[in-house]
Image: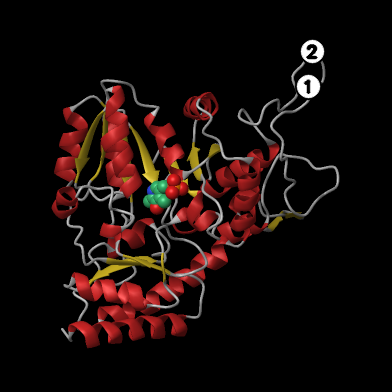
Amino acid sequence: MSAGTSGDEPVARDPKDYKIATKLAHAKTSVTDPYGASAPPLYQTATFAQPSATENGPYDYTRSGNPTRTQLEEQMANLECADRAFAFSSGMSALMCVTRLVNAGERIVTGDDIYGGTSRLLAQVVPKVGIEVVNVDMNDHDAVRAAIQGGNTTMVMMESPTNPRLQVIDIKAICDMAHEKGALVCVDNSIMCPTFQAPLALGADISMTSATKFIAGHSDVTGGLLACNGEELGNRIYFHQNAEGLHLGPFDCWLALRGLKTMQLRMERQQENAMKLTAWLESHPRVNKVNYPGLKANVGHELHSKQASGAGSIFSFTTGDVEFSKIVVEETKLHKITVSFGGTTSLISLPCFMSHASIPAEVRAARGLPDDLVRISCGIEDADDLLADLQYAFAVAEKRVGKA
Ligand SMILES: *Cc1c(COP(=O)(O)O)cnc(C)c1O
């Protein structure tokens, strides 16, 4: 409900109805501070003294809970419109925790174009404890339904858009299929963040975000977050966060809280830059394909526009020539050759040789991840400078390899 009057009494807007930008600037927390500090207090401590031998205070040991972490977890729950959120030492430990909700003999269904680290976790770690993992093309709904119904499926782990091909998956449709079977759905929302996409509102049970990327936003922290609704699920996640020591340390929580304040501004600027670069790439004769859901010509554009409010700042493209792609990646000056994404600096990479190298070559080929695929994550630089940088690298590549 918007601010206004009910009868004669002025009614302030309910903080629950604040838009994300406002929620980010006004972090919500139950942690009280006697001095009214404007920045979140950092409790860099492992232990907390207890009121007496027989009474427990609100915190005793940082693995079990820490006020700085509480602030981050409550703020994330607020942004996700979730009951609870949990902060982990990395995106991977957050995903590891999700797999702990699955027992031996049960099945996890996941996509065939997923983050390299997730692919490795599901292919090489999770099967060790007797969990079955089935990869399917998440856009082939008959295949997804068959995979979910075909085994003892208790978890579906998905991403949309996927990385690095930016395939858009119908989150709501997959959630409906999983719930028919009584399975939980975890959506990896690292590329969109709560700024652009709300997985829980689309039906997911767990929303996962790598805080290493846009949340911390300055390439200085690794962290991961899970947000969920319902007491039982929250308690199960908390149990594993504590029992396995998967939590994020206080200072990293503090950095993530600091990063969150400017997330909306960064994400909007980064998205604007991506729109400009993809528009240029799309019309370039050397570029065969641009994967970016923000382009009208993209197969996922319509679906993505329905389930997200922005296309984000990550895209990829192919040039048809590995050598050409390699020169482009190496000749850009402002785009640093770095894995990851979501920082303030623009990054460029050849995923098959970097972030996705842990996926065996034959699996990559089967999943349509060509070696000439270039991925860019736009930073917050000036768009014209970024475009000129890319144009320069293309010109060098054309000179060395020849025009298309
Ligand atoms: C980076 C990333 C992860 C893993 O997060 P870390 O913080 O690096 O452990 C998981 N999923 C996606 C989509 C990512 O981009």
The label number, if any, that marks residue 255 in the structure image:
none
Q: Is residue 59 above or below residue 177?
A: above
Q: Nearer the viewer, residue 342 or 200?
A: 342
Q: Which residue occupies 56% across, 46% down?
A: 76
Q: For the residue with label 2, is its CB less than 8 Å from the closest atom of ligand 1?
A: no
Q: Is residue 378 above or below residue 354?
A: below
Quarter that holds the C terminus: bottom left
Q: Secondary structure beneath disc 1?
A: loop
Q: Is residue 228 left or right of residue 295?
A: right
Q: Secondary structure beneath disc 2?
A: loop
The image quadrant that residue 105 belongs to is: top left
Within 10 Å of disc 2 (Cα), the crowding (few <14, some 14-19, many 20+) is few
Which amino acid lies under the numbered mark 2 shown in the image of this protein? Ala
Residue carrying label 2: 53
Q: Nearer the viewer, residue 308 or 164?
A: 164
Residue 249 in picture, x, y percent from top left: 61, 40
Q: Which residue occupies 29% across, 37% down?
A: 122
Within 10 Å of disc 1 (Cα), the crowding (few <14, some 14-19, many 20+) is few
Residue 108 in picture, x, y percent from top left: 28, 32
Do residues under tags 2 and 1 come within 8 Å of each other at their CB atoms? yes
Q: Is residue 56 left or right of residue 206?
A: right
Which amino acid lies under the numbered mark 1 shown in the image of this protein? Gln
Residue carrying label 1: 50
Residue 98 in picture, x, y percent from top left: 40, 33
Answer yes or no: is residue 189 visible: no
Total marks drawn? Answer: 2
Q: Nearer the viewer, residue 348 or 282?
A: 348
Answer yes or no: is residue 10 visible: yes
Q: For the residue with label 1, is its CB less than 8 Å from the closest atom of ligand 1?
A: no
Q: Is residue 269 above or below residue 106?
A: below
Q: Which residue occupies 35% across, 86% down?
A: 392
